[in-house]
Amino acid sequence: MSLRNELLLIKAKISEKKQKLRELDLKANNHIITIRNIIDASAYDEDFTELELERARVAFEDFYKIWIEAKEIKSQIKRLEQELNG
């Protein structure tokens, strides 16, 4: 494979990973909003046991998985950009 083709392939991978990162960012924002709405201290009537923490826990676990995936993708992007820029 020629150097030009390799560079194009790296650029395509970077673009693909950045798109995936944007998708994860959207999902993460949705989880943050959900968690905030559930744990909003002003939204419950003095009894914290009425909070839907089970729902918040599930949202947070999904959010955590997204966070781990996004950190890995950012690391891959950084590595690919370093390859691209020499």
Image (tube, grey):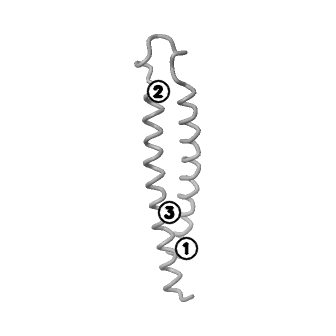
Write down the quadrant of residue 54 in the picture. Answer: top right
Q: Which residue is disc 1 drawn over?
A: 83
Distance of label 1 from label 2 (alpha carbons): 43 Å
Tell me if label 1 and label 2 are in contact, CB under 8 Å: no
> Residue most toward the left?
42
Q: In the image, residue 75 lies at what x, y percent?
A: 56, 59
> Residue most toward the bottom?
2
Considering the numbered disc 1 on the image, is that residue within a helix, a strand or a loop?
A: helix
Q: Nearer the viewer, mark 3 or mark 2?
A: 2
Q: Nearer the viewer, mark 1 or mark 3?
A: 3
Q: Which residue is disc 3 drawn over?
A: 17
Residue sitting nearer the eye, 37 or 18: 37
Q: Amino acid at mark 2?
A: Ile
Distance of label 3 from label 2 (alpha carbons): 31 Å
Distance of label 1 from label 3 (alpha carbons): 15 Å
Considering the numbered disc 2 on the image, is that residue within a helix, a strand or a loop?
A: helix
Q: Amino acid at mark 1?
A: Glu
Q: Which of the marked residues, 1 or 2, is nearer the chain's N terminus?
A: 2
Quadrant where the image shows the N terminus = bottom right
Considering the numbered disc 3 on the image, is that residue within a helix, a strand or a loop?
A: helix
Q: In the image, residue 13 lies at what x, y percent?
A: 51, 70
Residue found 46% across the figure and 46% down from its top: 27
Residue found 56% across the figure and 66% down from its top: 79
Q: Which of the marked residues, 1 or 3, is nearer the chain's N terminus?
A: 3
Residue found 44% across the figure and 61% down from its top: 19
Q: Which of the marked residues, 3 or 2, is nearer the chain's N terminus?
A: 3
Q: Which residue is disc 2 drawn over?
A: 38
Q: Amino acid at mark 3?
A: Lys
Q: Is residue 45 above or below residue 58?
A: above
